[in-house]
Image (cartoon, rainbow, N blue to C red):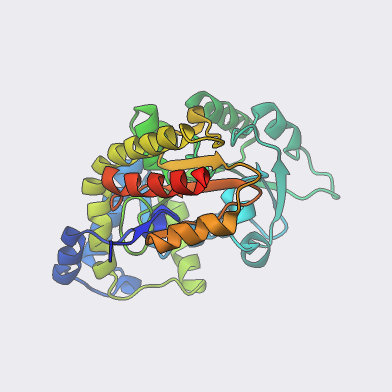
């Protein structure tokens, strides 16, 4: 039987052999007491790479984003963010349950929040009918696979600074964004007060994300992490692969992007498949299938070839590359699509 190819997401990545070895050899302590040296090393490295004073290791990206909202905001605050962002679409309404905030969404232009629209929604003054504008959230790279230009982030940052409203960046794939832009990741994070980045997506760590920001903010977030049940004990076994994620695996991301470009170009050459190659910025390929295609037959053919993928929704489908998917695996995937389309 051929090996399984999993293109559902880059969250499916297995830890590398080096990560498994690092986990076995990790020096550990009790992180709730702050004495796990491997966690402290990870948080120090992450803060430096992200250009922030301090960082906190958290269980997941969802946890990191919701912890940021919970720590930045007072209950009843309003958070301004894009209507198509991850916090709105894929975090189970956590902002209402945990932080008790109101989300005020803006229609984005492929993930870009227009600064004038952000400015219009900031609550100026002390009208007793208004919630307080507690936070603005950006996302880069966006979950649609596009990378937001620095100029657009800077424009929102300037508005936020004018009104003394903090900015949180959902940077789940911020290192992918930096690769696409050809810049240091700190050139992106400079336009946010706090940032969350995932270690367990394309960076291949088995568990965990980072929340980084000012030292005083992270101190509050550490207590809130405990409140939410996120206090970890001998977490060095999880922090050890996180260290390799931020060093070895960041260097691997350009290969993932090149493979996504290859996949996109091969799919675009198939009859009836529509791929906007200009949207392939990172390791995600979104494409539209012919309306007449039987999606059930496609998914059955992929499964028969030991290929895992999420099915199309409304004719639109996404495939995601990562370190366990190379050109030979992608050729197997393309062959299945070609066969089904030809039939």
Asked if one can make out residue 215 in the rendered structure from this viewpoint, the answer is: yes
Could you tell me residue 178's position as x and y percent? 37, 34
Q: Residue at x 43, y 55 (%)?
A: 218
Q: Residue at x 24, y 55 (%)?
A: 243
User: Height in image: 49 above or below 278?
Assistant: below
Could you tell me residue 244's position as x and y percent? 22, 53
Q: Residue at x 36, y 41 (%)?
A: 175
- The quarter holding residue 81 reads top right
Residue closer to the observer: 269 or 122: 269
Could you tell me residue 223's position as x and y percent? 46, 67
Residue closer to the observer: 257 or 92: 257
Task: Please indicate whether residue 130 sits to the left or right of residue 242 in the image.
Answer: right
Q: Quadrant of the N terminus?
A: bottom left
Could you tell me residue 214's position as x and y percent? 43, 47
User: Height in image: 343 above or below 151?
Assistant: below
Asked if one can make out residue 172 in the rendered structure from this viewpoint, the answer is: no
Furthest-front residue in this view: 343
């Amino acid at each position: 039987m051929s090996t399984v190819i999993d293109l559902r997401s880059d969250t499916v990545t297995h830890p590398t052999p080096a990560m498994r070895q690092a986990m076995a050899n990790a020096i550990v302590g009790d992180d709730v007491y702050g004495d796990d040296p491997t966690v402290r090393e990870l948080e120090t490295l992450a803060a430096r790479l992200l250009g922030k004073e301090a960082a906190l290791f958290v269980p997941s990206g969802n946890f990191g984003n919701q912890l940021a909202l919970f720590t930045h905001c007072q209950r009843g605050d309003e958070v301004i963010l894009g209507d198509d962002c991850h916090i709105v679409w894929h975090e189970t309404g956590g902002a209402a349950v945990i932080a008790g905030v109101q989300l005020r969404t803006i229609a984005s232009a492929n993930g870009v929040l227009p600064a004038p629209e952000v400015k219009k929604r900031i609550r100026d003054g002390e009208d007793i009918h208004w919630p307080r504008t507690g936070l603005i959230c950006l996302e880069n790279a966006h979950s649609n696979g596009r990378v937001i230009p620095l100029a657009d982030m800077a424009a929102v940052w300037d508005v936020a600074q004018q009104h003394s409203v903090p900015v949180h960046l959902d940077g789940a794939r911020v290192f992918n964004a930096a690769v696409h832009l050809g810049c240091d990741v700190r050139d992106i994070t400079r336009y946010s007060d706090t940032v969350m980045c995932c270690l367990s997506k394309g960076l291949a760590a088995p568990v965990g994300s980072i929340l980084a920001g000012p030292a005083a903010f992270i101190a509050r977030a550490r207590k809130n992490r405990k409140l939410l049940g996120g206090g970890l004990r001998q977490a060095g076994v999880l922090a050890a692969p996180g260290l390799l994620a931020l060093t070895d695996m960041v260097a691997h991301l350009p290969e993932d992007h090149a493979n996504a470009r290859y996949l996109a170009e091969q799919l675009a050459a198939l009859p009836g498949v529509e791929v906007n190659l200009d949207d392939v910025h990172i390791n995600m390929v979104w494409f539209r299938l012919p309306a007449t295609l039987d999606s059930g037959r496609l998914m059955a053919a992929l499964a028969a070839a030991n290929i895992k993928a999420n099915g199309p929704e409304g004719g639109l489908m996404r495939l995601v590359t990562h370190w366990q998917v190379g050109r030979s695996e992608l050729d197997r995937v393309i062959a299945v699509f070609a066969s089904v389309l030809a039939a």
